[in-house]
Amino acid sequence: MARHTTFRFCLDPTVEQTVALARHAGAARFAYNQCLRLHLDARERNRARDRARNDFDDATGETGQAWDGVPWSRFSLINAYNSWKVSEAAGRRFLVTSGGAAEVEVTGLAWRAEVSAQVFEEAAVDLGCGLAAWVESRSGKRTGRPVGHPRFKKKTHTAGSFRMRNKITGGHASIRVGQDRPRSVILPRIGSIRVREDTRRLRRMISTGRARILQATVTRGARRWWISITVEAADLHPAVQHPARPSEDTMGWVGVDRGLHALIVAGTRDGTETLRVRAPRILTAGLRRQQRLARAVSRKKRGSTNLRKASARLARHHVRVRDTRQHFLHQVSNQLVKTHDRLVLEDLNITGIMSNRRLARAVGDAAWGELARQTTYKQHWRNGQVVVADRWFASSKTCSSCGTLRKDLTLKERTFECHSCGHVLDRDLNAAANLAAWAEDHTHAVVDGAGRGEARVGDRQAAGPVINACRRDGTGPHTRVGETSPDDAGTPAQAAPAA
């Protein structure tokens, strides 16, 4: 099994299960905030101790002792939270004896047994990822937009979510699908929850050994609870995979030009159009309704019930727009990868284009980055190839017939006319043909011996595949975690930077 995929279902919980789900989501937010507080307090203590040590060294001329470190990695944050939740700082109560003497009893976090311990651990893992991204961004090791320092999560500013790993205990998985009824999911501490969609495909994959559940993420949004089950699945059937090409074959590339008038235009080097999909402009179609709902929210009194209702209506509209766009992008990406085994994408500076206030809404509605992400991982599943052309390659301004560059080409010109050879072609199709030609001329640097594209070459906006490595019971400082095993879906620990 070499790929990771996710099955998303809408939950249909009872009233008691809704309370339990909300309790787990609140516990995840609480654990995240508390881990961040422990981290910041440790950094502040370190700074104070360093100042005191420097003053002591200056006065005595001696070298001070080494102070305790700050929890940076995921395991260290888990250990710090586990130590805090049973301490006096987390909870205590006063007992008065028969003789009138008062005693202090350390209770720790009184409600910690009401939720699964994995919720606390996964919240600490999320904070560790955020801290690692912030450190790498500041040091220049992380490309892209700068990443800020993790902030505290507010109860009113988050929809609420939590994550659980699938633990194998005694041959039984903690997360099971369709055990007592076909449309149900069993979660630890919560029990069996009904789902609205059919789970037959996932159940068949699990029963035949073609899939293994790694983790489940439960999210609340627009008055509904959703569960995303991440599984490690087997490769697609060979009948739906593209046949491998020999390493010396550099032909057959199809360029994909992304635009606003036409979402994608795919074409070969000779200018043959293979696919054209118009942009649906889903956000623009619902913009008037969105403006009306937003005005209704702004008119309501702060803190009132009517404000919550109006905000819920606006949230449902945003969810509907997002789901419609996501469904359309999946249809387009599926059509691309099913009919083409070699695709060439543009390396678009989407962040820079979004800074143009005249184009930002249309570019965000087109979702170029999401389309590139879906196309990349789906083509990888089908044993196809996806390469990205150089960002500075002028695909739209170059003649696909003679290679002449037209620097005076404007955005409003939808037809490319070459002043040198007289070649006339649709602007988007001309760009797609140039992308296909660029790939055929550069495949010697991006295709490996097996005939597949170099995996490290990708669109900056397409990100990369999410790989959840299984982590084993650690040694040394990791032995105190006690809740990870070779069958758990975890993430590798990262080295802590200097405090």
Image: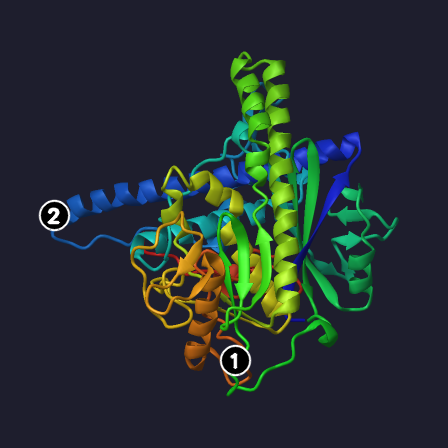
Amino acid type, label 2: Asp
Q: Which residue is mark 2?
A: 58
Front residue (pair 119, 367) = 367
Q: Which residue is mark 1?
A: 251
Q: Is residue 38 above or below residue 246?
A: above
Q: Quadrant of residue 143?
A: bottom left
Which is more foreground, mark 2 or mark 1?
1
Residue located at (65% from left, 68% from top): 339
Image marks 2 and 1: residues in contact by CB distance under 8 Å: no
Q: Hey, which residue is sitting farthest right in the picture?
A: 181
Amino acid type, label 1: Met
Q: Hey, which residue is sitting farthest top in the picture?
A: 301
Image location of residue 194, percent across then percent down: 81, 42
Q: Secondary structure at mark 1?
A: loop
Give left or right: position of 121 versus 420.
Answer: right
Q: Give neighbour class at mark 2: few <14, some 14-19, many 20+ (Cα, 10 Å).
A: few
